[in-house]
Image (tube, helix red, strand yellow):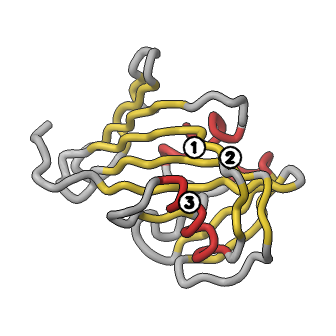
């Protein structure tokens, strides 16, 4: 795989959990247009991931998360120079405020048991259940994509690499 010339995009996601439901966003824009994802966004140049998750959750959902817990660090790589991501994935059980509207997508509280039936990005189908298990473990995962941004392999630190499919 060629070495990209552009730096990785640093981002956060946050699974807000309440009464067996998780707040998800049906995206209206790229990346992941038309798919359901946890809310999140990109780090500003002077932010730490924790500050970003608090800011992005408030901007995108209207919720102020309290003590979000880091549950995964995810690297996504591809031959495409503009698809190189590092994500910090959080879970929040405590938050204040009311869910509002956002230009990013439509927000909905989805039963956790229904997540496998939602159209989500391929990697989210793998790391979502690990993160939502909320067992206190911070997972380190790497997802590799081809030129069309199709998942080809994934691996968890300390485990064997797995082909997708």
Residue pointed to by mark 1: 125
Residue pointed to by mark 3: 53
View extreme (right): residue: 19
- For the residues bearing labels 2 and 1, Cβ distance under 8 angstroms: yes
Q: Is residue 150 left or right of residue 91?
A: left
Q: Is residue 42 above or below residue 113?
A: below
The image quadrant that residue 64 belongs to is bottom right
Residue at x 45%, y 32% (from the top left corner): 141
Q: CA–CA distance between discs 3 and 2? A: 24 Å
Between 42 and 113, the one lying in front of the other is 42
Q: CA–CA distance between discs 2 and 1? A: 7 Å
Residue at x 79%, y 69% (from the top left corner): 96
Residue pointed to by mark 2: 116
Q: Earlier in the sequence, mark 3 or mark 2?
A: 3
Q: Is residue 28 above or below residue 73?
A: below
Residue at x 60%, y 48% (from the top left corner): 90
């Amino acid at each position: 795989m060629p070495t990209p010339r552009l730096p990785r995009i640093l981002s956060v996601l946050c699974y807000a959990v309440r009464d067996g439901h998780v707040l998800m966003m049906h995206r209206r824009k790229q990346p992941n247009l038309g798919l359901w994802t946890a809310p999140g966004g990109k780090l500003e140049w002077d932010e730490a991931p924790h500050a970003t998750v608090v800011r992005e959750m408030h901007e995108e959902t209207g919720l102020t998360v309290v003590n979000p817990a880091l549950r995964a660090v995810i690297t996504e790589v591809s031959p495409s120079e503009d698809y190189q991501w590092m994500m910090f994935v959080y879970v929040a059980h405590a938050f204040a405020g009311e869910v509002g509207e956002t230009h990013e997508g439509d927000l909905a509280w989805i039963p956790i048991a229904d997540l496998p039936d939602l159209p989500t990005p391929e990697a989210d189908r793998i790391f979502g259940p690990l993160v939502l298990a909320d067992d206190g473990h911070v997972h380190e995962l790497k997802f590799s994509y081809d030129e069309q941004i199709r998942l080809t392999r994934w691996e968890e630190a300390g485990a064997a690499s797995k082909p997708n499919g």
